[in-house]
Image (tube, coloured by chain):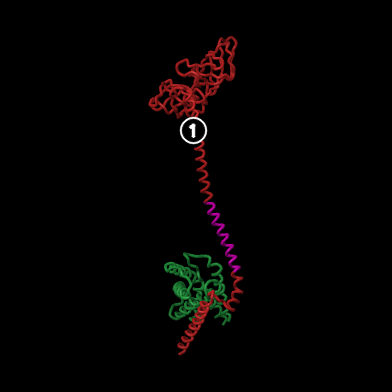
Amino acid sequence: MGELIAVRRRLALFFGLFVFVIALLTTQARSPDRRQVGAIGTTVLTVLVPVQTGMARVADGVQRMWNLYTEIGRLRVENAKLREALDGMGRRNAALQEQALAGERLERLLGFRGQVGSRSIAANVIGRDVGKWFGTVQVDRGTRDGVRRNAPVVTSDGVVGRVIEVTPTTARVLLVADSRSAVGVVVQRIRDLGVVEGRNERVLHLKYLSRTSDVQPGDVVVTSGQGGVFPKGLAVGRITRVVREEGELLLEAEVEPAAALDRLEEVLILLPL
Amino acid sequence: MSRVLAYTGVVVILALVQAAWLARVQVWGAILDPLVPLIVGVGILRGAESGAVVGVAAGLLQDLLSGGGPLGVNGLSKLVVGFASGMFERSIYIENPLLPAIATFIGTLLGGVLLVIVALLVGLGVPPWPAIVARLIMQAVLNSAIAPVLFRTIRVIETHFQREH
């Protein structure tokens, strides 16, 4: 019996609350904005909303800090990627600058080629004989390209040397700076003949000038065309010092090479017609 | 009276925490609702009447603080959950360690289904069914995870007031 009363009481409470909530919902559904809190609801909100607002502000602060933390992480990753991209662009830029400089050199070479008036072929310097103080260099053209022994080698600045060895794909060039080299020259201003011999890559030796020659420092020395190797008129260098010794019949002078023999990268090989 | 104040305090605190903080954090579209394990726990440990009263009060408070739809949507669903939990007061082994999680899982699903039905009847928009199902299951998992803590809270309150009497 007691159990039955308890069950009935329980059900009565449930249905009572159920009806209350349904009535509340029905009232809400009929009102224009579907929400009426009433006096009790207003009182509860008046007390609780300030607390809720304060808690929401705390949550806002935490969220802002979290957003900042994740943003920092994202920025770090982005920064690393951008640095990597920048490094790559720096390398590419350096490569492009190198290409631009090579292009300028080749353009000068091409322009000089037009002036030479004979067949020629451009070649890259691929090796140096470092042990002999830049006496010879190796280039990437050979008999397959029409290169022959004793072919003159020049740059847009001036004479480099001549071919002394040749294979199908490469050639070895004896530089004018080598002591074994001798080039017939003429002093451009006064037309005095002489011979330029190699000494080292920065200084050449002009010999067999007449003692009465009026050669001066600054005079340009060009190939004379005699000797059968170099065409006439190619720049060899500029006189830097004249040596006059007592009792000697001939004058000598020091010549600075026109071509930068220690920085060769591309050269022009003159081919027979 | 003191017991009523204690449960009122717990309900108010949990409702505020849910409205101000937990509503910002979603896991696969589901929001943790600590009031559900509390209502289920009160129903199981104190009976259907207590479950129903705490359920309707918590639900109406949730409706007030959420600021959305008409009053009574959560009130009705939590009333039923609280009452239904209390119906099993004498037919389950209360000391079972899995009880809080299992009971809360079922209670959350029941409350969620009722909420959707009431929302449809009142004319509120509901998401597509697959989204509702996924959200309900996720919410049930989340609520089950914290159920042991809330059940323990109820036991602490009950133990405290039993000692006083």
Instruction: Examine the residues drawn in magenta and state their main secondary structure.
Output: helix
Residue stretch in magenta:
A53-77
Q: Nearer the viewer, residue A53 or B159?
A: A53
Position of the N terminus of chain A, as image quadrant, is: bottom left
Position of the C terminus of chain A, as image quadrant, is: top left
Mark 1 crowd level (few <14, some 14–19, many ≥20, 10 Å Cα): few
For the point 59% across and 74% down, the residue is A45
Q: Which residue is mark 1?
A: A103
Residue B86 x %, y %: 47, 80
Q: Colour of chain B?
A: green
Tell me the SS state at disc 1: helix
- Amino acid found under the numbered disc labelled 1: Gly
| A72 part of magenta stretch | yes
Residue B88 x %, y %: 44, 79
- Name which quarter of the figure residue A248 lies in: top right
Which chain is red in the picture?
A
Q: Nearer the viewer, residue A198 or A35?
A: A35
Residue A180 x %, y %: 48, 19
